[in-house]
Image (tube, coloured by chain):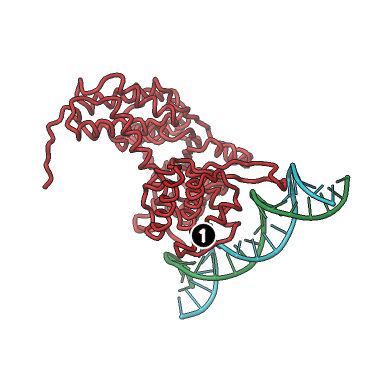
Chain colours: A red, B green, C cyan
Amino acid sequence: MFDFDETGNILRNDDALKDTCDPDKLPEREDELKEIRSALAPVTRGSTPENMLIYGPAGQGKTVGTNLVLESLEKHVEESLETSLDVVYVNCADLTSSYQVSGELLKEISPERDTRPRGHGASNIYDMIFDRFDELSEYVTVVLDEVDSIGDDDTILYQLSRAEQNNEVEDTRLSVIGISNDLNFHESISERAGDTLQPEEILFTAYNAKQLNAILRRRADRGLYDGSYDEGVIQLCGAFAAQRNGSARQAIRLLYKSARTAHDRGEETITEGHVREAQEVIERDILLEGLRELTTQQYAAVLAIASLEAKNQTPARTKVVYREYKNIAESAGIDVVTTRSIRENLQAMDLYNFLNTERKTGGTRGGERLVFELAHDLEQMLSIEVDGKFSGVVDTIQTRAESEGTL
DNA sequence: GATCCACAGGAAATAGTGGCTT
DNA sequence: AAGCCACTATTTCCTGTGGATC
């Protein structure tokens, strides 16, 4: 039976402490929001707003801030300007090309579609998009969140930003807002952009510890009972997040997790110990989530490094890793792919932060070498069950690590 | 100091999947 | 049903790099 004991002294309102709960104001971002407003302001004078590229690390209020400004603009347009504005929001995470984004956008604005179209030529998709735009409001603003995931192929941005000049749309005033977590993305765009796409660039710098504390205090004020936490808890949450990447989302998640840990134990107050504990759990969850998304081959490559780490043989060169990988793949009964492919996978694992890669020049034979090692605790990596096929392999590594004392 | 080795990584080809139009 | 079209994972082939070797 489940024993509901919800009479704690800590949590008052869970929702206020969830990172899915969007605030209705962002005092720490007033300057940036002002810039966004200014770029959208032409609407109030009957013109097309500026295109924008908003960039900065994750968890800095880029998406929330953009939505806040757009919402108030929508309202203003409807109430005072006798016309209307549609905001089309597309999250491009997991979309790896402009083609996919255009498909997702089409799906978003076509009520009859519930899957992304495939099998069309790219220009077909754009035609369908522009046709739909003409049926929407006079003003259409497309928000492409996490656009950086499309990589180098940025044709979608050009198509959308040029549509009006090229008369692809007849009576729609179209603008694009790209939101990017990748600081390099705007460079690669401006390099090739030439004169067609000249977005207003708005930078959200990472929150510092002081700003994170202020954000956390507001959340705690609404979500926690007075006296169940002290300033030290807030500051520790802020400090952890500031250290990592200044993400407000992470900071809030940490505070919430700490509060729940304390609550579940029936304690009176949240302590710094709870925060540290929650931080560990969160890190493990992030790792787990990431590992689950790997392909079989990628996971095998990570295990090869883990296996070498158990034998104290990391950092290891590609060639050595490949030998280890081959054994693992054979005993797990999966296809063995070539070195070329494993090298590619290993480097992808570095991008996902499972491995650390170093470039070394000048081995025994010269040329460039890559050496890899785990980016996380071996013990932590092994404690996560990802794919049953590898359970035997994981056990072997575990045993080896114990006898080598590398855990 | 030319040549060689062993690796990095680009480019193109291939194979399999699956939606879409006609 | 046939024929597109695009995607993904992989292989094959090839060029580049730079210390070691003779």
Chain of the residue on which disc 1 is drawn = A
Q: Amino acid at mark 1?
A: Asn
- Residue at horizontal 48 percent and vertical 55 percent from the top: A300
Other residues around mark 1 within 10 Å, as few (<14) / some (14–19) / many (≥20): some
- The vertical placement of A169 against A187, above or below, is below
- Quarter of the image with the C terminus of chain A is top left
Left/right placement of residue B2 relative to residue A5 reads: right
- Residue at horizontal 45 percent and vertical 56 percent from the top: A295
Task: Residue A137: give x, y in percent of width and height.
Answer: 39, 44
Secondary structure under tag 1 reads helix
Task: Residue C6: give x, y in percent of width and height.
Answer: 52, 59
* Residue nearest the observer in this picture, A153 or A373: A373
- Residue at horizontal 65 percent and vertical 46 percent from the top: A369
Most extreme residue toward the front, as rendered? A403
Total numbered labels placed on residues in the image: 1
Task: Residue A123: give x, y in percent of width and height.
Answer: 53, 57
Quick check: can you spot residue A340? Answer: yes
* Residue nearest the observer in this picture, A174 or A363: A363
Task: Residue A181: give x, y in percent of width and height.
Answer: 48, 37
* Residue nearest the observer in this picture, B7 or A237: B7
Give the residue at mark 1: A327
- The vertical placement of A257 against A174, above or below, is above
Quick check: can you spot residue A164? Answer: no
